Image: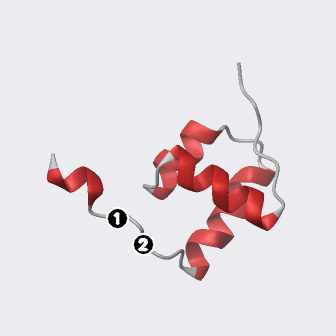
Amino acid sequence: MAEAFARHRQPWKQDEIQKLHTLAKKGMGLKAIAKALTRTEESVKDKAKEDGLNIAKLR
C-alpha cells in the first residue's frame, strides 16, 4: 500500500508535461491520462489547468 504514494508531491518532468499535452489533444479522458502518467487525477487536472489545457469530459 505504501507504493501508492511513491510519487507523492514529485515535480513534473518535461517529458511528462509533453505527454500530458499530447494525450489531452488526442481527447483522452482524465482517468486514462492519469493512469498513463502514473499520476493522480487531481494532479493531472491541476497541471492541465495550470498549462491551459482542456481535458475531455467522457461519459
Q: Residues within 10 Å of mark 2 (few under 14, many from 20)?
A: few
Asked whether disc 2 touches disc 1, contact meaning CB atoms under 8 Å apart, the reply is yes
Q: How many marks?
A: 2
- Residue shown at 42% from the left, 72% from the top: 10
Disc 2/disc 1 C-alpha distance (Å):
6 Å
Q: Give the x, y percent position of residue 30.
A: 63, 40
Q: Position of residue 51 (x, y in %)?
A: 78, 66
- Is residue 22 at least partly visible in the picture? no
Q: Which residue is mark 2?
A: 10
Taking the image as shown, residue 38 lies to the left or right of residue 45, namely left
Task: Provide the residue designation for mark 1.
Answer: 7
| Secondary structure state at the residue bearing disc 2 | loop
Q: In the current view of this chain or complex, which residue is farthest to the left?
A: 1
Residue drawn at the location 77% of the way across and 37% of the way down? 56
Quick one: quadrant of the C terminus? top right
Q: What is the residue that sits farthest to the bottom in this orientation?
A: 14
Task: Identify the element where label 1 is drawn.
Answer: loop
> Where on the picture, by quarter, is residue 18?
bottom right
> In the displayed structure, would residue 21 be above or below residue 41?
below
Amino acid type, mark 1:
Arg
Q: State the image quarter where residue 14 is shown.
A: bottom right
Position of the N terminus by quadrant: top left
| Amino acid type, residue under disc 2 in the picture | Gln
The furthest residue to the top: 59
Mark 1 Cα within 10 Å, few/some/many (few <14, many 20+)?
few
Q: Nearer the viewer, residue 22 or 2?
A: 2
Q: Position of residue 27 (x, y in %)?
A: 77, 42
Percent across and percent down for residue 22 are 72, 60
